[in-house]
Image: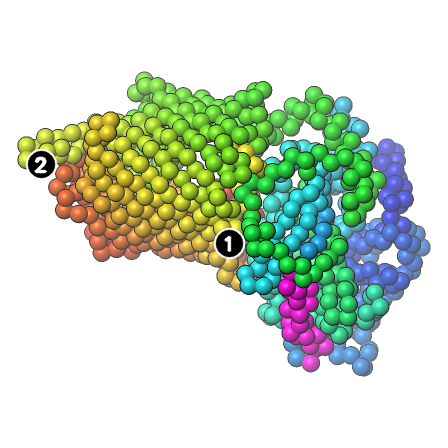
Amino acid sequence: MKKFLFKFIILFSVGIVAQTKVSGVVYDEFKATIPYANVCFKSNKQCVTTDENGKFYIESDSDQKILVISYVGFKNKEITLIKAVNYNMNITFSGANALEEVKIYSGKTSKKNNPAVDILRKIWERKRKNGLQIFKQYEMNKYEKVEFDMNTIDSAFMKNRVFKGLEFIFKQIDTSKITGKTFLPIFINESIYEVYGDNTGLDKKKEILKANKNSGLGTGNGVDTFVKDLYSEYNIYNNYLTFFDKNFVSPLSTTGINTYNYVLSDTAYIDNKRCFNIVYYPRRKGELTFKGDFWVSDTTFAIKKINMAATKSANINWVKDIYVEQEFDVLNDSVFLLKRDHMMSDFSLNKKEKSKGVYGKRTTLYSDYKFDIVKPDKFYKQEVNSYDQQAFNKSDEYWQENRMESLSKNEAGVYKMLDTLKTVKKFKQMYNFVTVLASGYYQLGKFDYGPLFSTFGYNDIEGVRIRVGGRTYFGPNDLWRIQGYSAYGLKDNKLKYGVSARWMVDKKNRLILSAGNRTDIEQIGVSLTTSNDVLGRSFASSSFFASGDNSKLTNVNLTTVGAEIEPFKNLVFNAGFSFRKLESASQTFSLNYFKNLETGEIASKVKQYEFTVGLDYTPKRLTVGYGVDRLEVESFYPRVFVNLSQGLKGIFNSDFEYQKLQLYYRQPILVGGLGRLVTTVEVGKIFGTVPLGLMAVVPGNQSYFTIDNTYNLMNYYEFITDQYTSIHLEHHFSGKIFSRIPFMKKLNWREIVGVKGVYGSISDENKAINASGINYVAPTKGYWEYNAGIANIFKVFRIDFSWRGSYLELPDAKKFTIKGSFGFYF
């Protein structure tokens, strides 16, 4: 009885919000489901497309009496709706379409003599003649609303004892107009921008945040990173649309006829413009494609409306649904401009129909277009740290006047509900628990304890290692931060520590001063491009999951003072001083060098003072936050890093004079529909004579896991250089090959291939002072290895098979290895 009352209440309440709701499955006369059939309300031409299993959901804010179902090869079927809410309908087609004037398409449609494809070619011809591209300059206002909702809320979920004392939140339950599922808002964020652009020469664009308002689980932009791809810029006219680091083929792509079936479904007048309606659906399962339909003008061939739903068989993790809907406004007979852009993603652990998840929704509206107003070039200079506190303190009256789309009744109540929720003790406990899992830190007032995942470690020298640490934390935009740790080895009975402080003294150009000190045990030589990060600790320093000899560890005492500045967006200059002491931490490993070749005097410690300058350029990198520490929105951006170090002899008893030049370049490339190629190049040279502790050691990988920018079949200190060139190529096919193998389609595995190589040499002077006992070998004829891998095993595991291609004759040379890694990837 209670379950019946719950359903009645839900149906009654949603019936008030939306007048007509219909869901069901479409079958053919043989009781087989029909994927990609067109389902429309007859009176307003509002349509959806059935999914791969023939299921659909459609909703209208007005009363609708007739539902029309159409599919190529069948007669259209009209169904009279006798009530407002019609769930779980079973609709059956029967009889072939007998129209003589229209060519019949069934299954895969023809590319020739297909009127839909002819229209598509006209769209390709005109796509650069519609929209903002035809103007030299443009201005507009932009309103953006981002929302997260828990979905598939049912009576059993509401009665869970976890929600005891929190029952008031369920008053905000609503129903999705796209999926028909119930949902509960848990976060909402609104922003208003002024947008400016210049299409002359290099395209320039600038957005000025005028207002921002949010409430819910999290603090502003930190939560936005969870659905980072809701902020991805995409243009439906492009050949590929990127969502969640994946390249989907656009239905308007010039290669679309090889990926989609197209059917001319209808014609109608929209805003007094005659438009064609074209339905599209994928030719093959398992690929990154959409289904849906679009309306296109019969004269300008500009898109008026389009909806795109990602096919459920698409090889993408943790996302059950992606839905995109765009509407364009008619400026005049030849110009259509984007008016409304809506995207919804359903994040879920699996793709089962009844699984619960979280909706991430973004709605963007544009208005007040202005054109050909020239702005000076300096106006478009991107601000490095454009934080305006006033934008976050706008009144309710301001929002009522400036929202381009009014909040629904449920959305309006969300702010109050979420603000109230954050004052409930039980909710605070639940939220803190989730925060600890996500960040690794446990908050104690203005101090964060952690990272918790670094509490225990192990290596041959320290034995079991216990670590405690933390950081100051007043908020995500702190202008200064102090962090540190202390560690103790149960085998060597020695205390280690590290402390670091950073202070942003100039917010506009992000001028940051830093200082730190660390005394610890490290596995050095695990990266060609060196770092003076005081608190950094390589994965190789712990041998919980390592193979082979792991005793080549070093006692490191490092002190640094530095400064960095970001005068231009994503271009950082840095300079610093460092003083390091290096000494072997093991009786079986030596850093010895000849201090005097004539007398044969040997030294076992390195004391080195160094001055460093460098730049770090990361174009297209997106970050959130305005404090001394920021979060990166994504990692898919190029990076150029240049570093010049000067070793000075004599200062603080420093031992060596040298210069070290290093260059690092990383470039990820989306290769159309073939996946993603990641290219990494490192080059460097040391001018001067230095011992083993300061040499450029080619980074080996003795762990059981795959580690970026290391060599899987190389041991620590196997190759030593003072000049080198290293290149890593790794291509991710994202399941493109496996999806075409019948028995592997459902596994959703993803293919990876790669090759790594390094060439280097070493000077006679550096060989001469070597007294470490390690035989210096440089890859003078070029070392290389190649690998093939399978990713997305059980969604979280990757396995790589690696083969050595050269230097097979070396003692203890590994010729083959298998390594794995875990990760949560879309």
Mark 1, residue position: 750
* The one of 242 and 754 positioned closer to us in this rendering: 242
Kind of residue at disc 2: Leu
SS type, badge 2: loop
Give how far across and how far down residue 131 sits, in percent. 69, 64
Between discs 2 and 1, the one toward the N terminus: 2
Give how far across and how far down residue 569 sits, in percent. 51, 46
Q: Residues within 10 Å of mark 2 (few under 14, many from 20)?
A: few
Query: Eyeballing the image, is 147 above or below 577?
Result: below
Q: Residues within 10 Å of mark 1 (few under 14, many from 20)?
A: many
User: Which segment is the magenta one?
Assistant: 113-137
Query: Eyeballing the image, is 182 above or below 744?
Result: above
Query: Eyeballing the image, is 655 above or below 792?
Result: above
Prevailing secondary structure class for the magenta stretch in the rendered image = helix
Q: Residue at x 39, y 51 (%)?
A: 665
Mark 2, residue position: 597
Residue that lies at the very extreme toward the right in this rendered image = 82
